[in-house]
Amino acid sequence: VSGASLKSAITVNGSLLASASVVAPTLGGLLIAATATHIGFFVAAGGWIAMFIANLFLPRRGSSPEQRSVIRELATGFRFIRGHRVLLMLMGFGWIGLLPAYVDQLGGDAREVGFVFSSAGIGALSGIVVAGRLSPRRHAGRLMLGAAAAFSATMLFVANSPSLWLGMGLAVVAHFGNGMFNISALVAVQLRVPDAIRGRVMGVFAISQSIGGCSGGSGPTRWPRQLGSGRG
């Protein structure tokens, strides 16, 4: 993809992913609530198999004759990011992995988990569409800072929401900012990364998106206890 078309390509790809995150979680939550959890996983696995089959028919761009190490490839991406600290600041960390625990705390079940996922997807899709219509060079830095600040501030209200339905509405607002930030950050990063190592650097960015979910096992149980004991 040429540099001139890069933002449009990223916006289209992000919109497709966000659209899927609006419909699929709601259907999955309703399916699990009506049947059982393993049925939902079975249907999701079928979707991944369909994606695998579709990838088999994608046009090939050729392959390198030399055998490459995945670890070395990722290390190249890490070194590039470490040498360009501004890219490190643009790496995002998600909260989606904590969402089921959040819904459970407010008395929800599988159906409500799907609804909250879809609420976040609606906000992200809206933010992606708006960001895609803005000029990539005018006030890009201010747009990203404003979107990140809006997401962070709204998430404080989501975390303290007394109602699950209010949390859903706030999740839409929060992920509107998150969608704008993510698309703007991806465009900024890919325009600054050389073509030869773009895949390696973006692989590191993809890994960073899942780091927030990795803290779900200890953070939600330990932090509230510490805060509670601190308050007496």
Image: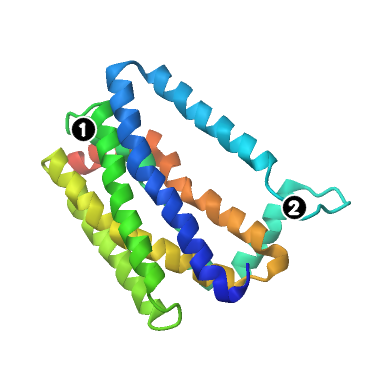
Q: Residue lying at the far bottom in this picture: please name it.
A: 138
Q: Can residue 96 be seen in this snapshot?
A: yes
Residue 216 appears left or right of 168? right
Q: Residue lying at the far left in this picture: please name it.
A: 162
Picture residue at 44% right of the left edge, 64% below the top: 183
Q: Which mark is residue 105?
A: 1
Q: Can residue 231 be seen in this snapshot?
A: no
Q: Earlier in the sequence, mark 1 or mark 2?
A: 2
Residue 135 appears left or right of 208? left
- Is 166 above or below relative to 109? below
**In the foreground, 179 or 47:** 47
Location of the C terminus (image quadrant) = top left
Image location (x, y in percent) of residue 23: 34, 40
Q: Secondary structure beneath disc 1?
A: helix
Name which quarter of the figure residue 116 lies in: top left
Location of the N terminus (image quadrant) = bottom right
Q: Which residue is mark 2?
A: 72
The kind of residue tagged 2 is: Arg
Q: State yes or no: discs 1 and 2 in contact (Cβ < 8 Å).
A: no
Q: Residue lying at the far top in this picture: please name it.
A: 35
Picture residue at 76% right of the left edge, 55% below the top: 61
